[in-house]
Image (cartoon, rainbow, N blue to C red):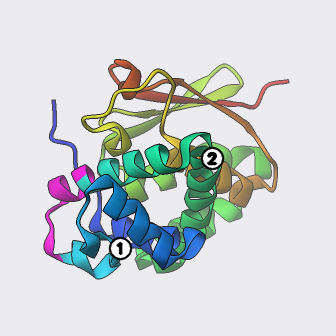
Amino acid sequence: MAETTFPLRVMRRFVVTLSSEIGHETLSAVLSKSGLPEEWADALHFVALDEARTAQAYARLQSALRTYYGRGARGILLRIGAKLWNQLLDDSAFGIKAQAALIRRLPKPARRKPALELLARMVGAGNITVHTLDLDLLLVDQTSPTTLNQSDDTPICFVTLGLIRECLYWADGQEHDIEERACRALGARQCEFKIIIGG
Protein backbone atom coordinates (compact mmCIF):
# COMPACT_ATOMS: atom_id res chain seq x y z
CA MET A 1 0.00 0.00 0.00
CA ALA A 2 1.39 3.39 -0.98
CA GLU A 3 2.20 5.85 1.79
CA THR A 4 -0.62 8.33 2.31
CA THR A 5 0.39 11.83 1.24
CA PHE A 6 -1.45 15.11 0.85
CA PRO A 7 -0.40 18.06 -1.33
CA LEU A 8 1.06 20.96 0.68
CA ARG A 9 -0.67 23.50 -1.56
CA VAL A 10 -4.07 21.99 -0.77
CA MET A 11 -3.29 21.79 2.96
CA ARG A 12 -2.33 25.46 3.12
CA ARG A 13 -5.55 26.41 1.34
CA PHE A 14 -7.54 24.12 3.66
CA VAL A 15 -6.15 25.84 6.79
CA VAL A 16 -6.77 29.35 5.37
CA THR A 17 -10.36 28.41 4.43
CA LEU A 18 -10.97 26.72 7.78
CA SER A 19 -9.69 29.77 9.68
CA SER A 20 -11.92 32.08 7.64
CA GLU A 21 -14.95 29.76 8.08
CA ILE A 22 -14.81 29.32 11.89
CA GLY A 23 -12.56 32.25 12.89
CA HIS A 24 -8.91 32.22 13.96
CA GLU A 25 -9.75 32.27 17.69
CA THR A 26 -12.10 29.31 17.39
CA LEU A 27 -9.51 27.39 15.37
CA SER A 28 -6.95 28.08 18.12
CA ALA A 29 -9.49 26.80 20.70
CA VAL A 30 -10.07 23.60 18.66
CA LEU A 31 -6.31 23.00 18.49
CA SER A 32 -5.82 23.69 22.19
CA LYS A 33 -8.71 21.45 23.28
CA SER A 34 -7.42 18.62 21.05
CA GLY A 35 -3.81 18.92 22.20
CA LEU A 36 -2.67 19.82 18.68
CA PRO A 37 0.15 22.31 18.00
CA GLU A 38 -0.96 25.95 18.12
CA GLU A 39 1.11 26.73 15.01
CA TRP A 40 -1.27 24.56 12.95
CA ALA A 41 -3.57 27.60 12.85
CA ASP A 42 -1.00 29.22 10.52
CA ALA A 43 -1.04 27.85 6.96
CA LEU A 44 2.63 28.79 6.50
CA HIS A 45 3.60 26.25 9.18
CA PHE A 46 2.92 23.45 6.69
CA VAL A 47 5.54 24.67 4.21
CA ALA A 48 8.15 22.92 6.35
CA LEU A 49 6.39 19.52 6.38
CA ASP A 50 6.69 16.73 3.84
CA GLU A 51 3.51 15.45 2.20
CA ALA A 52 3.28 12.35 4.44
CA ARG A 53 3.34 14.45 7.63
CA THR A 54 0.92 16.88 5.98
CA ALA A 55 -1.53 13.97 5.44
CA GLN A 56 -1.29 13.07 9.14
CA ALA A 57 -1.97 16.69 10.13
CA TYR A 58 -4.91 16.90 7.69
CA ALA A 59 -6.53 13.81 9.25
CA ARG A 60 -5.89 14.91 12.85
CA LEU A 61 -7.21 18.42 12.24
CA GLN A 62 -10.47 17.10 10.79
CA SER A 63 -10.77 14.61 13.65
CA ALA A 64 -10.37 17.51 16.12
CA LEU A 65 -13.11 19.45 14.32
CA ARG A 66 -15.49 16.46 14.40
CA THR A 67 -14.86 16.09 18.16
CA TYR A 68 -15.28 19.82 18.84
CA TYR A 69 -18.42 20.37 16.74
CA GLY A 70 -20.02 16.93 16.88
CA ARG A 71 -22.68 16.59 14.18
CA GLY A 72 -22.20 20.24 13.20
CA ALA A 73 -18.74 19.41 11.82
CA ARG A 74 -20.28 17.86 8.69
CA GLY A 75 -21.79 21.14 7.46
CA ILE A 76 -18.63 23.12 8.24
CA LEU A 77 -16.36 20.65 6.43
CA LEU A 78 -18.73 20.40 3.42
CA ARG A 79 -18.65 24.21 3.08
CA ILE A 80 -14.85 24.24 3.34
CA GLY A 81 -14.62 21.58 0.61
CA ALA A 82 -16.95 23.63 -1.62
CA LYS A 83 -14.90 26.82 -1.11
CA LEU A 84 -11.63 24.94 -1.68
CA TRP A 85 -12.61 23.93 -5.22
CA ASN A 86 -12.67 27.47 -6.64
CA GLN A 87 -9.58 28.52 -4.68
CA LEU A 88 -7.57 25.56 -5.92
CA LEU A 89 -8.69 26.26 -9.47
CA ASP A 90 -7.71 29.94 -9.17
CA ASP A 91 -4.29 28.97 -7.72
CA SER A 92 -3.56 26.18 -10.18
CA ALA A 93 -0.76 25.91 -12.69
CA PHE A 94 -1.26 26.79 -16.36
CA GLY A 95 -1.81 23.13 -17.40
CA ILE A 96 -4.72 22.71 -14.98
CA LYS A 97 -6.27 26.02 -16.05
CA ALA A 98 -5.98 25.03 -19.71
CA GLN A 99 -7.64 21.68 -18.98
CA ALA A 100 -10.42 23.47 -17.07
CA ALA A 101 -11.02 25.80 -20.02
CA LEU A 102 -11.31 22.80 -22.38
CA ILE A 103 -13.81 21.09 -20.06
CA ARG A 104 -16.02 24.19 -20.00
CA ARG A 105 -16.25 24.06 -23.82
CA LEU A 106 -17.74 20.54 -23.81
CA PRO A 107 -21.53 19.95 -23.86
CA LYS A 108 -22.76 20.05 -20.22
CA PRO A 109 -23.44 16.29 -19.82
CA ALA A 110 -19.94 15.52 -21.13
CA ARG A 111 -18.23 17.78 -18.57
CA ARG A 112 -18.85 15.78 -15.39
CA LYS A 113 -16.31 12.97 -15.69
CA PRO A 114 -13.47 15.17 -17.02
CA ALA A 115 -14.19 17.70 -14.23
CA LEU A 116 -13.88 14.96 -11.60
CA GLU A 117 -10.67 13.74 -13.28
CA LEU A 118 -9.36 17.31 -13.04
CA LEU A 119 -10.21 17.35 -9.32
CA ALA A 120 -8.41 14.01 -8.91
CA ARG A 121 -5.34 15.46 -10.60
CA MET A 122 -5.37 18.51 -8.32
CA VAL A 123 -5.73 16.76 -4.96
CA GLY A 124 -5.17 13.05 -5.45
CA ALA A 125 -1.45 12.53 -6.05
CA GLY A 126 -2.39 9.71 -8.45
CA ASN A 127 -4.53 7.89 -5.85
CA ILE A 128 -7.97 9.01 -7.08
CA THR A 129 -9.72 7.46 -10.07
CA VAL A 130 -13.09 8.17 -11.70
CA HIS A 131 -15.28 5.43 -13.18
CA THR A 132 -18.55 5.24 -15.12
CA LEU A 133 -21.34 3.11 -13.57
CA ASP A 134 -24.11 2.88 -16.17
CA LEU A 135 -25.46 6.47 -16.03
CA ASP A 136 -23.79 7.30 -12.71
CA LEU A 137 -20.18 8.09 -11.79
CA LEU A 138 -17.92 6.72 -9.07
CA LEU A 139 -14.93 8.55 -7.61
CA VAL A 140 -12.55 6.21 -5.77
CA ASP A 141 -9.89 7.50 -3.36
CA GLN A 142 -7.44 4.68 -2.59
CA THR A 143 -5.54 6.42 0.24
CA SER A 144 -8.00 9.08 1.45
CA PRO A 145 -5.85 11.29 3.73
CA THR A 146 -8.92 12.29 5.80
CA THR A 147 -9.15 8.71 7.10
CA LEU A 148 -5.47 8.23 8.05
CA ASN A 149 -5.41 6.47 11.47
CA GLN A 150 -9.14 7.26 11.90
CA SER A 151 -12.03 4.94 12.65
CA ASP A 152 -15.69 5.84 12.89
CA ASP A 153 -19.11 4.25 12.51
CA THR A 154 -20.15 6.59 9.67
CA PRO A 155 -18.26 7.97 6.62
CA ILE A 156 -16.11 11.02 7.46
CA CYS A 157 -14.83 12.42 4.14
CA PHE A 158 -16.92 15.60 4.21
CA VAL A 159 -14.28 17.89 2.67
CA THR A 160 -13.91 15.52 -0.29
CA LEU A 161 -17.70 15.40 -0.62
CA GLY A 162 -17.82 19.23 -0.66
CA LEU A 163 -15.06 19.34 -3.29
CA ILE A 164 -16.92 16.84 -5.51
CA ARG A 165 -20.22 18.71 -5.13
CA GLU A 166 -18.72 22.10 -6.03
CA CYS A 167 -16.59 20.65 -8.86
CA LEU A 168 -19.71 19.20 -10.51
CA TYR A 169 -21.68 22.40 -9.96
CA TRP A 170 -18.82 24.32 -11.63
CA ALA A 171 -18.92 21.82 -14.51
CA ASP A 172 -22.62 21.76 -15.36
CA GLY A 173 -24.44 24.22 -13.06
CA GLN A 174 -26.48 21.44 -11.43
CA GLU A 175 -26.74 20.03 -7.91
CA HIS A 176 -25.98 16.30 -7.72
CA ASP A 177 -26.79 13.61 -5.18
CA ILE A 178 -23.48 12.25 -3.91
CA GLU A 179 -23.14 9.39 -1.46
CA GLU A 180 -19.97 8.16 0.22
CA ARG A 181 -20.83 4.49 -0.01
CA ALA A 182 -17.54 3.12 1.34
CA CYS A 183 -15.07 4.79 3.74
CA ARG A 184 -11.68 3.65 5.00
CA ALA A 185 -12.64 4.97 8.45
CA LEU A 186 -15.24 2.17 8.53
CA GLY A 187 -12.64 -0.43 7.51
CA ALA A 188 -13.24 -0.33 3.74
CA ARG A 189 -10.25 -0.77 1.42
CA GLN A 190 -10.90 2.60 -0.24
CA CYS A 191 -13.32 5.52 -0.06
CA GLU A 192 -15.97 5.49 -2.78
CA PHE A 193 -18.25 8.37 -3.74
CA LYS A 194 -21.21 7.57 -5.97
CA ILE A 195 -22.51 10.49 -8.04
CA ILE A 196 -26.10 9.83 -9.05
CA ILE A 197 -26.82 11.16 -12.53
CA GLY A 198 -29.36 8.69 -13.87
CA GLY A 199 -32.99 9.48 -12.96
The local crowd at label 1, few if under 14, some if 14 to 19, many if 20 or more residues have their Cα within 10 Å, is: many
Q: Can the viewer see residue 52 in this picture?
A: yes
**On the rendered structure, is 184 left or right of 20?**
left
Q: Which mark is residue 144?
A: none
Give the extent of the magenta segment: 48-56
The local crowd at label 2, few if under 14, some if 14 to 19, many if 20 or more residues have their Cα within 10 Å, is: few
- The answer to whether residue 109 is above or below residue 186 is below
To which residue does mark 2 refer? 72
Residue type at numbered disc 1: Ala
To which residue does mark 1 refer? 41
Residue type at numbered disc 2: Gly
Tell me which residue sits at (73%, 54%) in the image. 169
Which of the image's four quarters has the N terminus?
top left
The image position of residue 5, as x and y in percent, is 22, 50
- The answer to whether residue 156 is above or below residue 168 is above
Taking depth in this image into account, of 27 and 147 the one nearest to the observer is 27
Taking depth in this image into account, of 35 and 14 the one nearest to the observer is 35
Which of the image's four quarters has the C terminus?
top right
The image position of residue 61, as x and y in percent, is 35, 55
